[in-house]
Image (cartoon, helix red, strand yellow):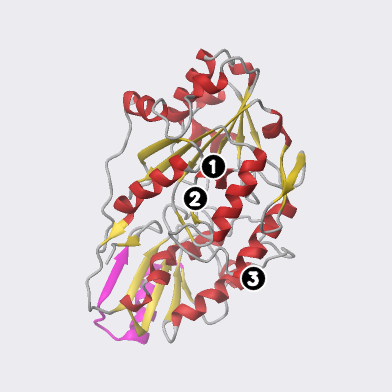
Amino acid sequence: MLRMAGAAEIADRATIEHAINSPIGSPTIADIARGKPSAAIAIDDISRSTRLEGILAVVLEELNRAGIEDGRITIIAALGAHRPMTRQDFAKKAGTSILNRVNVVNHSPFLNLVKVGTSKLGTPVLVNKTYMDASVKIAVGGVIPHFLAGYGGGAKIVLPGLCGFETLEANHRVALKSGAGLGLGIITELRKDIEDACAMAGLDFSINVVANAEGKNAGIFAGHYIDAHRKAIDFSKGVYKTDIPKGIRYDVGFFNAFPEDTELNQCMKALNLFMINNAIIDRKGAVVIMTAASEGRGYHALLAEDGSPLPIKESVAMVGAFMARRKLCLFSPNVTRADVRQFFPGTVLFKDDFAGLIGEIEQVVGRSPSACVFESSMQLPSPG
């Protein structure tokens, strides 16, 4: 079992207040909001594990203190091309105490958009109009490794989170075709383009949250959407680092998709660490993706639906370069073979029962294989 270093949960109000009211590279929320008529708070969606209730309570208090009442504050779920959130989703993410105070809405990539410019990489930037109309713009998001943007959080809450479908498609295409976004755990050219788009849209205050192995908030870094984000990345590297035995190649690797495991269409993120260090698994071994996929196939308008402009199989095919002769396997109790065929080639070994999976793997690697288990898609190899 190869675990990340981890960190303790931040749960007490005083620590949250201190993190938010000691901003990095920007004034405080109260100073930014003083004299302004309205505010919008963009949050990451239910496919991310960020715990928001305690953070949002402090943000609302600061906005109120600056003179912006609850009735002039809107929380926007920055969905990108993901499905809309239900009341139950919002209750899980933000808590009923927040839902009962302010207006909470879903972003749509198809409606209520305004164009604010074109990014340096040629991406037309269309942004949620409700967000653009707000006089104070705040965002809260998790900082987890991302194959295209390096890390989540920061400006990524705006692009793709609050952008139109045309913007999302152009942003992903330039990343995949030019290689601008290929770089897990680093600041990629795509990340810089995202930050360029964010500068056009505006983001007054960014709250960046680092999760521990259980998906609970372990670090909060607030302030400027670049400066605070980079501090969060520095902290996250210590939390996500995983010591991998040198000189050992395991026959089987089990890679868990948690915390991005609500939908099958996000399960490839389980292989983040493998794609950085594929030598850990023998070239004739087996690589197993494990995902709860509690929402089954899930929804992603850009990548995962019939007729989507960027079929997810193109992204899956990119993983083939890392697989060599290794057998790719998938374990999930909540999906069907039809779901799996939507994303994977017919050669993938799929099982919805773990005992059956083990039996099939033994036919590939033998009866007593060496195996390693990674608990989270957030894990990164320790430096050196």
For the residues bearing labels 2 and 1, Cβ distance under 8 angstroms: yes
Q: Report crowding for label 1: few under 14, some 14 to 19, many 20 or more residues within 10 A (C-alpha).
A: many
- Contact check, label 3 and label 2, Cβ < 8 Å: no
- Which x, y percent locates residue 92? 49, 36
Between circles 2 and 1, the one closer to the viewer is 2
- N-terminal of the pair, mark 3 or mark 1, is 1
Circle 3 residues within 10 Å: few <14, some 14–19, many ≥20: few
Q: Secondary structure at mark 1?
A: loop
Give the magenta part as a residue range: 352-374
Task: Residue under label 2, please give it.
Answer: 152
Q: Hey, which quadrant is residue 298 in on the image?
A: bottom right
Q: Mark 3, mark 1: which one is toward the viewer?
A: 3
Residue 209's place in the image compared with 255, above or below, is above
Q: Position of residue 357 (x, y in %)?
A: 39, 74
Between marks 2 and 1, how big is the CA–CA gap?
Answer: 10 Å
Residue 177 - label: 3
Q: Amino acid at mark 2?
A: Gly
Q: Which residue is mark 1?
A: 44
Q: CA distance from mark 3 to mark 1?
A: 27 Å
In terms of sequence position, does the residue under pointer 2 or pointer 1 come before the other?
1
Amino acid carrying mark 3 in the image:
Lys
Quadrant (top left, top right, bottom left, bottom right) of the N terminus: bottom left
Q: Is residue 129 visible?
A: yes
Q: Quadrant of the C terminus?
A: bottom left
| Residue 157 sits in quarter | top right
Give coordinates of residue 194: x percent, y percent.
60, 51
Name the residue at 27% across, 84% down: 367
67 vs 193: above or below: above
Q: Is residue 131 left or right of residue 32?
A: right
